[in-house]
Amino acid sequence: MNIQTAPAEAIEEPPSAAPRQSESNQETMFECARPEMTLVPTSVQWNNWRWQMRKRIRSVAELAAIYKWDAIPGDVYEAASRFPLAITPYYASLAQRLDRSDPIFAMSVPQGLELVDPVFLREDPLEEECDMPVPGLVHRYPDRALLITTSICAMYCRHCTRKRVTGQRESVISAAQLRQAIIYLQKHPEIRDVIVSGGDPLTFSTKALEKILSAIRSVPSVDIIRIGTRTPVTLPMRITDNLVAMLRRYHPLWINTHFNHPQELTPLAAEACARLADAGIPLGNQTVLLRGINDDPRVIETLCRGLIRNRVRPYYLFQCDLVRGVEHFRTPLARGIEIMEYLRGRLSGLAIPTFVVDAPHGGGKIPVLPQYVLSSSPNHTVLRNFEGTLISYPEPQANAEPLETVPIDPACGPTVADLACGRRDKIQPAGTARQGRRARQVVRAASA
Ligand SMILES: *Cc1c(COP(=O)(O)O)cnc(C)c1O
Ligand code: SF4
């Protein structure tokens, strides 16, 4: 897509990319106490989101100065020129180590690995450009549409699925394009859920964002508005009282954010989420599964527990898309399934996201689960739970057909076939913690 910039008519001027001369980054932002790698904010402006946007780190040279990073590989420069670089001082300050073992570093700092380019990777693997009836509006599913409102983000994630859009040319939707999108929504009353996306729509000024929200709200057939934003993670000071007071005028409004690692769940991020939740905005989270960053069941567990403590519901866990420049972040699908296997039963259902693959060729989101249905016959379905207990679930009598009368083979022991024909109820692993609790409960009941 080509988001045209039409300054006279644009919703808002994009922020200027370069920091002002008088505000040299390395002098005013941090004291960097290496080797411990603690970046101490020094500016009184730290909590001002506009200052954070203005002072985004935009070049490898700036980054090197801030991190006091002296040996920069040449391919880092190349990666940064191919895919734009921007990091808010706030997000940069969360790094604890200067290498890929640090999740903050790995998600924000350009790496030569982005230049690895297998043939199956695409600029636009989800084929969003093919599902755009008007520029910027992706209409893929029957009842919802996604509006790309800006190519600007506070931080350009190295794993971004819209690398073809984000930051390539910092621009915002024009008033004319917004009008076209609204006309399309008016003509398609089946669209009941509009996702305001980008880039990051919370990089707009509150006033400019309100223009977009009120335009969408003027369409009576739209039930809910969703905003996709990573600012609670990369620019939490953006969630001001003023913003929240505006947002709550457009209810029902939902926000999905994008935490990938527990290290991002800082007190400031928690405060941002609390402000939104207090305004009655239901919060969801979309995590991208990233190799070496969060492809560990325990990291996802900690993240999901942290999210629900902050009233953020884990919504999706995404398989990393087949987009150019992200090959080094991809994990096998099996890893996602393994993580889901680990979470189910161990975590509150509220803390468990749906693992989805956003399919290549514009196939849309496809949930992928471990196998819980193991076998079936017309009268019984064999299920298994997280512990490995196999359960024979009887189907309604109306469908029942005569049970087979194959004799039990004592030499064989219980088999899944016994469950499928309903001859047994369950097959259970021995010695689980739950069985221990149950056994103690029976003893207590007997002695009471
Ligand atoms: C992800 C997405 C949506 C929203 O899908 P949900 O499953 O409802 O969250 C809508 N449109 C497009 C184009 C999308 O990529
Ligand atoms: S905030 Fe979202 S849209 Fe922006 S770079 Fe990160 S993943 Fe991409």
Image: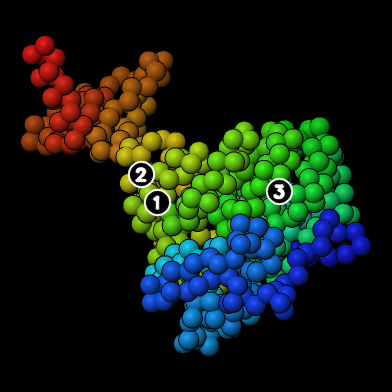
The correct choice, above or below, for 21 with respect to 201 in the image is below
**Residue 131, position in %: x, y?**
72, 54
Disc 2 residue crowd, few under 14, some 14–19, many 20+, Cα 10 Å: many
Q: Does the residue at mark 2 contact the one at mark 1 (Cβ under 8 Å)? A: yes
Which label's residue is closer to the chain start, 2 or 3?
A: 3
Q: Which residue is mark 2?
A: 343
- Left or right of residue 116: residue 191: right
**Residue 207, position in %: x, y?**
80, 49
Query: Hey, what amino acid is under mark 2?
Result: Leu
Give the residue drawn at x 39%, y 18%: 396
Query: Hey, what amino acid is under mark 1?
Result: Ile
Q: Mark 2: which secondary structure?
A: helix
Which label's residue is closer to the chain start, 2 or 1?
A: 1
* Residue 298 visible here: yes
Locate the N terminus by quadrant: bottom right
- Left or right of residue 329: residue 436: left
**Residue 204, position in %: x, y?**
74, 55
Q: Which residue is mark 1?
A: 300
